[in-house]
Image (cartoon, rainbow, N blue to C red):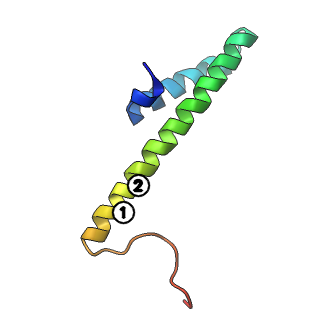
Amino acid sequence: MQIAEMSFEDAMAELERVVAALEKGDVPLEQSIALYERGAALKAHCATKLKAAEEKVEMIRAQEGRATGTTPAEGL
């Protein structure tokens, strides 16, 4: 499956498998490099999905009139 089509949960599960394979240490060098590249792409995909989810939550909170973000107001 293409990484761009993966859900957050599927990408995290595959990332965990990649990390486990690399930590095991019995993967040939070329395969290790390929796994590392896939792992980096999976991590980036997960970060993007997580950021999008956080932004949706902030939008919902803003619509409900709740404070959003963590940046203090000037002068406080």
Picture coordinates of residue 56 (x, y %)? 34, 56
To which quarter of the image does residue 41 belong? top right
Q: Residues within 10 Å of mark 1 (few under 14, many from 20)?
A: some
Confirm or deny contact between disc 2 and disc 1 (CB under 8 A). yes
Per the model, the C-alpha gap separating discs 2 and 1 is: 6 Å
Q: Is residue 22 above or below residue 69?
A: above
Q: Is residue 44 above or below residue 29?
A: below
Q: Is residue 19 visible?
A: no
Name the amino acid type tagged 1: Glu
Q: Is residue 8 left or right of residue 33?
A: left
Residue found 36% across the figure and 75% down from its top: 67
Q: Secondary structure at mark 2?
A: helix
For disc 2, the marked residue is 54
Residue found 36% across the figure and 63% down from its top: 58
Name the amino acid type tagged 2: Glu
For disc 1, the marked residue is 58
Q: Is residue 27 above or below residue 63?
A: above
Q: Which mark is residue 18?
A: none
Q: Is residue 73 above or below residue 11?
A: below
Picture coordinates of residue 51 (x, y %)? 46, 50
| Name of the residue lying farthest toward the left | 64
Picture coordinates of residue 12 (x, y %)? 47, 32
